[in-house]
Amino acid sequence: MTNKAKLHIVESAAKYIFTFCAVLAVFAVCSITVYMIAKGTPAFKNVGVSELLFGTLWKPTAAEPSFGIQYIILSSIVGTAASVLLGVPIGLFTAVFLTEVSGKRLAAVVQPAIELLAAIPSVIYGLLGLMLLNPLMYKLERILFAGSETHQFTGGANMISAVLVLAIMILPTVVNVSASSIRAVSKELRAASMALGASKMQTIFKVTVPAAKSGIMTGVVLGIGRALGEAMAINMVAGGSVNLPLPFNSVRFLTTQLVSEMGYAEGIHRQVLFSVGLVLYVFIMVINLLLLKLRKEAVENEA
Amino acid sequence: MKHNNGSRLSGKWRISDMILYVLIGLCAAFAVLLLVSIIVYVLMRGIGSVNWQFLTTVTSVRKGTVGIAGNIVNTVMIVILTMFIATPVGVGAAIYLNEYAKPGKAVRIIEFATETLSGIPSIIFGLFGRIFFGETLGLGYSLLTGALTLILMVLPLITRNTQEALKTVPNSYRHGAVGLGAGKWYTIRTILLPSSMPGIITGVILAIGRIVGESAALLFTAGSGKALPKTFVAIFPKIFQSGGTMTINLYLSATSEGDFDTAFGSAVVLLVLVFLINLVTKRLAAKYDTQRAKQLPCLHG
């Protein structure tokens, strides 16, 4: 074989290998989707779509089992919404602090703090919630529900604890994405607003933040995805009974349902858990599509 | 603090402005205080458990030892196994996207898939890993199942960082190499990869950080084994055995076992590790930025 032919083979081999590497991501997403659907749908057939999605009774191991996951879905939605409502304002204000208010020296303290908060593993957040938040919630619970005969005492492992932990965990995502989109707003816009006599705060909240809207929305949606998908931390603090998502109830989320029962579930119970996974996957895919749309909008805005 | 505040010209502070200033300051202070109190609390509760025995032995009632050495070895092995495959594949994908592919539908699909993959929560990866690698491929609860699952999870991280790094390599480098008669692969191997090495390494270290902190994707794939391989050779068969990482051990200690000394001790070790990883990435990024600043004139020159 001539040198040139050898070179040609090496070059085209390289190209095929790199193409294969790139296609692997597509292949992975496709097989995850196929597996989630294939494993998640049989339970819908065996239990019944409405009974599964809208049933409120979760008794997977009873003699006459019942597999209603409505409360679990509701808990995930309510928990995510509440943590986003709590986390986003704090995150946005912190982002404003970093980009508009603080000097370089203060930003040099806050920025690394946010980065480190993002780096802390979720089990550590769970451990801290378990040791600090739950006892606090138990005290509150004993005061609020003193003498109540209907309230099921949880020892503080409740929805509020989970929401607080989630709000803290989505904080870095919201701060980082919002801050970088606020930084991208042009200086002229701010200067024009100030020149018209607007105060600094008016400029920030009436001009700069609205101009960075699509980036901030991206941060919010990423936060929603993070909160919805978090499993271990909230499994440690939320109790674990399937209940209506009320503040002082012990609750189960889509994710914690998987964490706590995948280890031992069998038969239809196991199939239902895969359906829980499928429901979560559908939620996440909707969020991913939303993100794609937001990014497109951001690119169009720039252009 | 001196601010270029418009309302000062009229001589009075708006009350709403004051409130907003205070709120903004409070939120930023909250984030910093939160981090400080997390660190202080974890150290206070956990530092007492961390000693040489804790790091080098396995918890055993018979020997009277408390330690997480088995979990440390498992963590290291999962990191090595995962990165051994994820790094070349992730870098390869980035090279394809940046150097070979022409902009169009194929690239859009691959980039969308990469984005999607990075948005999938780890518990879903865990579920998929359990049924695909664990059951369909019959690998059961093992370090290998865990590593294969994590490859999918960290792939986007490496691809994206490598792509960013490749984008900063000036086109003149490519043209120069081609002009001298180098083939594409030769150019990639000798010019592009070395120039984008800091970016690739940043991606790899970020991925390692993600693996060290990961738990939900490992619970049903790698399992929770704690045993320490007795000899160096015994490490290799361990790939096919169940092994819990430090995070999994922390989780189990804090929940089913109720052993909070081990949990907080593990938390201290984990915090030190992830903060170190964070420091290294920042250093690299800073170094890379100065390098990029030096290269910038080439772009226009």
Image (tube, rainbow, N blue to C red):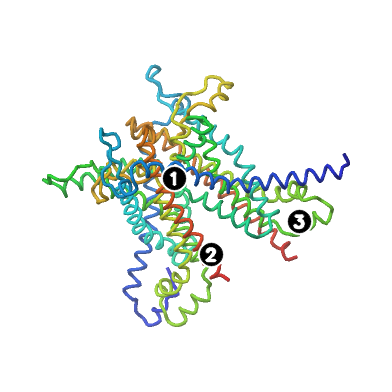
Instruction: Tell me which amino acid carries mark 2.
Output: Lys
Residue A175 falls in which quadrant of the image?
Answer: bottom left
* The furthest residue to the top: B62
Q: Earlier in the sequence, mark 2 or mark 1?
A: 1
Labels 3, 1: front one: 3
- Say which quadrant the C terminus of chain B sits in: bottom right
SS for tag 3? helix
Mark 3 neighbour class, 10 Å CA radius: few under 14, some 14 to 19, many 20 or more? some
Q: How far from the left and from the top, in percent, is residue A143? A: 16, 48
Q: Could you give the CA–CA distance between mark 2 and mark 1, rounded to whole angstroms?
A: 31 Å
Q: Which mark is residue A120?
A: 1
Q: Nearer the viewer, residue A229 or A27?
A: A27
In the rendered image, which residue does mark 3 sit on?
B174
In the rendered image, which residue does mark 2 sit on?
A296
Side of B92 where B230 appears, left or right: left
SS for tag 2? helix
Task: For mark 3, name the chain.
Answer: B
Instruction: Tell me which amino acid carries mark 3.
Output: Arg
- Say which quadrant the N terminus of chain B sits in: bottom left
Q: How far from the left and from the top, in percent, is residue A87? A: 37, 57
Task: For mark 1, name the chain.
Answer: A
Side of B245 where B178 appears, left or right: right
